[in-house]
Amino acid sequence: GAVVSQHPSWVICKSGTSVKIECRSLDFQATTMFWYRQFPKQSLMLMATSNEGSKATYEQGVEKDKFLINHASLTLSTLTVTSAHPEDSSFYICSAPGEWTDTQYFGPGTRLTVL
Amino acid sequence: DQQVKQNSPSLSVQEGRISILNCDYTNSMFDYFLWYKKYPAEGPTFLISISSIKDKNEDGRFTVFLNKSAKHLSLHIVPSQPGDSAVYFCAASPGLGGGGSNYKLTFGKGTLLTVNP
């Protein structure tokens, strides 16, 4: 199946700093990518839809100024957590639909810990 | 309002037996359903999917059944193996194709499957 990568796989940062997470589709192009967040023992919660060439669409309750999304190319979307706080600590996962299928393929996730 | 529900947080079965994971949904706009398997600290791995025009889809040991009138789907794993132990997520989307929000997935809370040797 299609491969989606994320970088970094984990990051620890101090409160107040900004952290950038990259999501890449390795062998296919993705005009749309999705960013999810998962708290321990919780479901995956969709944060935003990343659209290549246009602004991201954020879900209700997600601060767009805090979680900056840039879909720089057909294979790369980035999520920047700005002025991170401990409550932003979570597991962030991206996904992209395959080019010729409705199936979404997920990245391995990024564990963010804010001290 | 939870649009995709997995009412069993956990399920334990013996190796070699059948595992049945259930999922209910409320949104009649959902047209495409997927099952994902997830290990801790990893991204979900796609298992199998089904579109609303079908009532069954089979792939090896995995079969998904869809009862559209009941808004219910289930994943059957036969025979279950210890390596199947993971959290299984049911997901739904408006599908099919069309890009953008048609791919937006709504997930259930997951069911932790434990297959005992």
Image (cartoon, coloured by chain):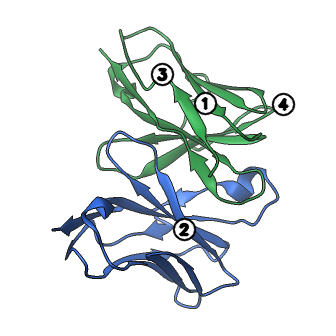
Chain colours: A green, B blue
Please rate how many residues cluster around mark 2, counting C-alpha atoms within 10 Å: few if below 14, some from 14 to 19, many from 20.
some
Work out how far the residue at label 2 is from the one at label 1, CA to CA, in angstroms: 23 Å
Q: Which residue is mark 3?
A: A8
- Disc 2 marks a residue whose amino acid type is Ile
Instruction: Kindly tell me whether residue B1 is visible in this rendering.
Output: no
Which numbered disc flags the more N-terminal residue, 1 or 3? Answer: 3
Q: Which mark is residue A23?
A: 1
Residue designated by label 2: B48
Q: Chain of mark 4?
A: A
In the image: residue B117, left or right of residue A19: left
Which is more N-terminal, label 1 or label 4?
Answer: 1
How far apart are labels 4 and 2 at the CA level?
Answer: 31 Å
Residue B4 image position (x, y, % from top left): 48, 68
Question: Mark 4 or mark 2, which is nearer to you?
Answer: 2
User: What is the CA distance from the residue labelled 4 to the residue labelled 1?
Assistant: 16 Å
Q: Please tell me whether residue A67 is drawn above or below residue B50 in the rendered image.
A: above
> Which quarter of the rendering shows the C terminus of chain B?
bottom left
Q: Are marks 3 and 2 on the same chain?
A: no
> Residue at left 48%, top 22%?
A8
Residue at 79% over, 53% down: B99
Q: Nearer the viewer, residue B1 or B10?
A: B10
